[in-house]
Image: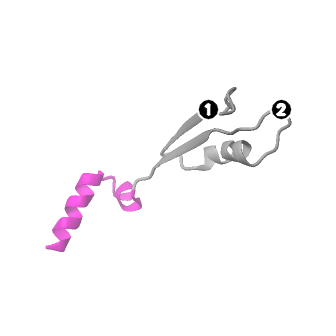
């Protein structure tokens, strides 16, 4: 990933199943590394899409999982 030319840009990152690993170095470069010719001053949004481990393991969707939980409460 490349840094935006505008140091005041807003960056929106979507981690849809990848986890945070691909974004860690990018966030580090934006906010912690010191560069003589560039200083990021913008906003960075990182959205994570994390399925529950039970739903991922069993291959069922979220709504089916919620239905099963409700049936278990009865």
The quarter of the displayed image where residue 73 is located: bottom left
Residue picked out by circle 1: 9
Q: Quadrant of the N terminus?
A: top right
Single out the residue that lies furthest toward the right.
Answer: 36
The residue lying toward the viewer, choosing from 74 and 48, is: 48
Rendered position, 26 above or below 55: above
Between 19 and 28, the residue placed more toward the observer is 28
- Residue 31: x percent and y percent? 71, 46
Q: Residue furthest top?
A: 5
Q: In the image, what residue occupies the spot 16% across and 67% down?
A: 71
Task: Classify 51 as above or below 69.
Answer: above
> What residue is drawn where x is 54% and y is 43%?
45
- Left or right, residue 54 beside residue 23: left
Res 38 → quadrant: top right
- In this rendering, is residue 73 above or below 40? below
Distance of label 2 from label 1 (alpha carbons) = 16 Å
Q: Magenta segment, which residues?
A: 52-74
Q: Secondary structure under badge 2?
A: loop
| Secondary structure mostly seen in the magenta stretch | helix
Magenta segment: does it hold 68?
yes
> How dense is the environment of label 2, judged by Cα within 10 Å: few (below 14), some, or many (20 and up)?
few
Q: Percent position (x, y) of residue 17?
A: 48, 46
Residue linked to disc 2: 37
* For the residues bearing labels 2 and 1, Cβ distance under 8 angstroms: no
**Residue at point 38% right, 55% down?**
56
Task: Please give left or right for residue 27 compared with residue 68 in the image.
Answer: right
Residue appearing at x 68%, y 42% in the figure: 26
Picture coordinates of residue 49, whole percent (x, y): 44, 48
Q: Quadrant of the C terminus?
A: bottom left
């Amino acid at each position: 990933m490349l840094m935006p030319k505008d140091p005041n840009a807003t960056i929106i990152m979507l981690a849809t199943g990848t986890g945070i690993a691909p974004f860690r170095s990018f966030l580090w470069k934006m906010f912690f590394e010191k560069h003589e010719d560039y200083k990021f001053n913008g906003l960075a949004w990182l959205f994570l899409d994390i399925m529950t481990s039970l739903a991922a393991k069993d291959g069922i969707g979220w709504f089916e999982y919620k239905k099963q939980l409700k049936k278990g409460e009865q």
